[in-house]
Image (cartoon, rainbow, N blue to C red):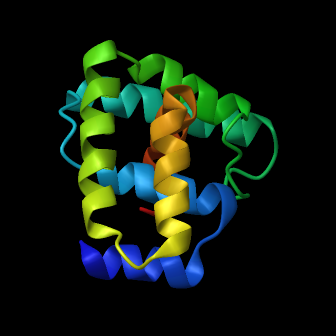
Amino acid sequence: MRAWLEQVEATAEGDDALAVLAWLAGAELAIPDEELTGALRRGVLLLAAGGDPHRGLVLDGRAVVAVADDLDAPERRDALDVGLAALEGEADGLPMVTAALERLRSDRPLAWRSYAAGLLGEELAG
Protein backbone atom coordinates (compact mmCIF):
# COMPACT_ATOMS: atom_id res chain seq x y z
CA MET A 1 0.00 0.00 0.00
CA ARG A 2 2.90 2.35 0.73
CA ALA A 3 3.91 2.29 -2.96
CA TRP A 4 0.40 3.43 -3.93
CA LEU A 5 0.54 6.27 -1.40
CA GLU A 6 3.96 7.35 -2.68
CA GLN A 7 2.58 7.36 -6.22
CA VAL A 8 -0.35 9.55 -5.14
CA GLU A 9 2.08 11.88 -3.35
CA ALA A 10 4.20 12.19 -6.50
CA THR A 11 1.54 12.51 -9.17
CA ALA A 12 -1.99 13.23 -7.97
CA GLU A 13 -3.45 16.48 -6.75
CA GLY A 14 -6.76 18.01 -5.80
CA ASP A 15 -9.90 15.98 -6.43
CA ASP A 16 -7.93 13.26 -8.21
CA ALA A 17 -5.86 12.61 -5.08
CA LEU A 18 -8.99 12.52 -2.92
CA ALA A 19 -10.68 10.05 -5.27
CA VAL A 20 -7.67 7.73 -5.44
CA LEU A 21 -7.15 7.77 -1.67
CA ALA A 22 -10.83 7.13 -0.94
CA TRP A 23 -10.88 4.34 -3.55
CA LEU A 24 -7.84 2.74 -1.91
CA ALA A 25 -9.39 3.10 1.54
CA GLY A 26 -12.62 1.52 0.34
CA ALA A 27 -11.02 -1.46 -1.37
CA GLU A 28 -12.52 -3.84 1.21
CA LEU A 29 -16.07 -2.47 1.11
CA ALA A 30 -18.53 -5.21 0.28
CA ILE A 31 -21.03 -3.92 -2.26
CA PRO A 32 -23.11 -6.51 -4.11
CA ASP A 33 -22.14 -6.70 -7.78
CA GLU A 34 -25.63 -5.97 -9.11
CA GLU A 35 -25.96 -2.87 -6.92
CA LEU A 36 -22.50 -1.60 -7.88
CA THR A 37 -22.99 -2.34 -11.58
CA GLY A 38 -26.33 -0.52 -11.65
CA ALA A 39 -24.98 2.55 -9.85
CA LEU A 40 -21.94 2.76 -12.11
CA ARG A 41 -24.04 2.28 -15.24
CA ARG A 42 -26.27 5.20 -14.20
CA GLY A 43 -23.19 7.30 -13.45
CA VAL A 44 -21.67 6.62 -16.86
CA LEU A 45 -24.99 7.45 -18.55
CA LEU A 46 -25.14 10.76 -16.67
CA LEU A 47 -21.62 11.56 -17.82
CA ALA A 48 -22.49 10.67 -21.40
CA ALA A 49 -25.65 12.80 -21.27
CA GLY A 50 -23.49 15.76 -20.24
CA GLY A 51 -21.03 15.34 -23.11
CA ASP A 52 -17.79 13.36 -23.08
CA PRO A 53 -18.02 10.47 -20.57
CA HIS A 54 -14.21 10.37 -20.35
CA ARG A 55 -13.71 13.95 -19.20
CA GLY A 56 -12.49 14.54 -15.68
CA LEU A 57 -14.79 13.65 -12.81
CA VAL A 58 -16.02 16.39 -10.50
CA LEU A 59 -16.69 15.42 -6.88
CA ASP A 60 -19.91 17.43 -6.76
CA GLY A 61 -20.90 16.64 -10.35
CA ARG A 62 -24.19 14.91 -11.17
CA ALA A 63 -22.65 11.55 -12.04
CA VAL A 64 -20.48 11.27 -8.92
CA VAL A 65 -23.28 12.44 -6.63
CA ALA A 66 -25.68 9.94 -8.21
CA VAL A 67 -23.27 7.03 -7.68
CA ALA A 68 -22.60 8.17 -4.11
CA ASP A 69 -26.33 8.42 -3.37
CA ASP A 70 -27.08 5.03 -4.95
CA LEU A 71 -24.45 3.24 -2.86
CA ASP A 72 -24.79 5.20 0.38
CA ALA A 73 -25.30 3.36 3.66
CA PRO A 74 -24.12 4.27 7.17
CA GLU A 75 -22.17 1.03 7.58
CA ARG A 76 -20.37 1.64 4.28
CA ARG A 77 -19.38 5.16 5.35
CA ASP A 78 -18.11 3.69 8.63
CA ALA A 79 -16.07 1.08 6.77
CA LEU A 80 -14.62 3.78 4.51
CA ASP A 81 -13.58 5.79 7.57
CA VAL A 82 -11.83 2.71 8.98
CA GLY A 83 -9.98 2.32 5.68
CA LEU A 84 -8.98 5.98 5.67
CA ALA A 85 -7.65 5.66 9.23
CA ALA A 86 -5.58 2.65 8.17
CA LEU A 87 -4.08 4.65 5.30
CA GLU A 88 -3.17 7.46 7.70
CA GLY A 89 -1.00 4.98 9.54
CA GLU A 90 0.95 4.30 6.35
CA ALA A 91 1.26 7.91 5.16
CA ASP A 92 4.07 9.01 7.47
CA GLY A 93 6.43 11.33 5.60
CA LEU A 94 3.96 12.01 2.78
CA PRO A 95 2.64 15.52 3.53
CA MET A 96 0.17 15.85 0.64
CA VAL A 97 -1.31 12.42 1.25
CA THR A 98 -1.51 13.07 5.00
CA ALA A 99 -3.31 16.38 4.45
CA ALA A 100 -5.72 14.80 1.95
CA LEU A 101 -6.50 11.92 4.32
CA GLU A 102 -7.13 14.37 7.17
CA ARG A 103 -9.49 16.31 4.92
CA LEU A 104 -11.38 13.16 3.95
CA ARG A 105 -11.67 11.99 7.56
CA SER A 106 -12.99 15.37 8.69
CA ASP A 107 -15.65 15.55 5.96
CA ARG A 108 -17.53 12.25 5.62
CA PRO A 109 -19.78 13.43 2.75
CA LEU A 110 -16.68 14.51 0.80
CA ALA A 111 -15.03 11.17 1.57
CA TRP A 112 -18.07 9.27 0.33
CA ARG A 113 -18.29 11.31 -2.90
CA SER A 114 -14.54 10.83 -3.38
CA TYR A 115 -15.01 7.08 -3.03
CA ALA A 116 -17.83 7.17 -5.59
CA ALA A 117 -15.58 9.16 -7.95
CA GLY A 118 -12.87 6.54 -7.52
CA LEU A 119 -15.29 3.75 -8.39
CA LEU A 120 -16.59 5.67 -11.40
CA GLY A 121 -13.03 6.44 -12.53
CA GLU A 122 -12.15 2.77 -12.27
CA GLU A 123 -15.21 1.90 -14.35
CA LEU A 124 -14.27 4.42 -17.04
CA ALA A 125 -10.67 3.21 -17.13
CA GLY A 126 -11.75 -0.44 -17.47
Where, by quadrant of the figure, is residue 105 drawn?
Answer: top left
The residue closer to the viewer here, 113 or 9, is 9
**Residue 112 screen position, x and y as percent:** 47, 32
Quadrant that contains the C terminus: bottom left
Where, by quadrant of the figure, is residue 117 drawn?
Answer: top right
User: Going by the picture, which residue comes out furthest to the top?
Assistant: 74
The number of numbered badges drawn on the structure is 0
Q: Residue at x 39, y 22 (%)?
A: 71
The residue closer to the viewer here, 4 or 126, is 4
Q: Residue at x 18, y 44 (%)?
A: 28
Q: Residue at x 32, y 36 (%)?
A: 81
Where, by quadrant of the figure, is residue 94 drawn?
Answer: bottom left
Q: Is residue 33 visible?
A: yes
Q: Residue at x 27, y 77 (%)?
A: 2
Q: Is residue 122 visible?
A: no
86 sits left or right of 81 in the view? left
The residue closer to the viewer here, 109 or 35, is 109
User: Going by the picture, which residue comes out furthest to the right?
Assistant: 51
Q: Is residue 15 above or below residue 61?
A: below
**Residue 80 screen position, x and y as percent:** 31, 37
Q: Is residue 97 above or below residue 19?
A: below
Quadrant that contains the N terminus: bottom left
Q: Is residue 122 above or below residue 76?
A: below
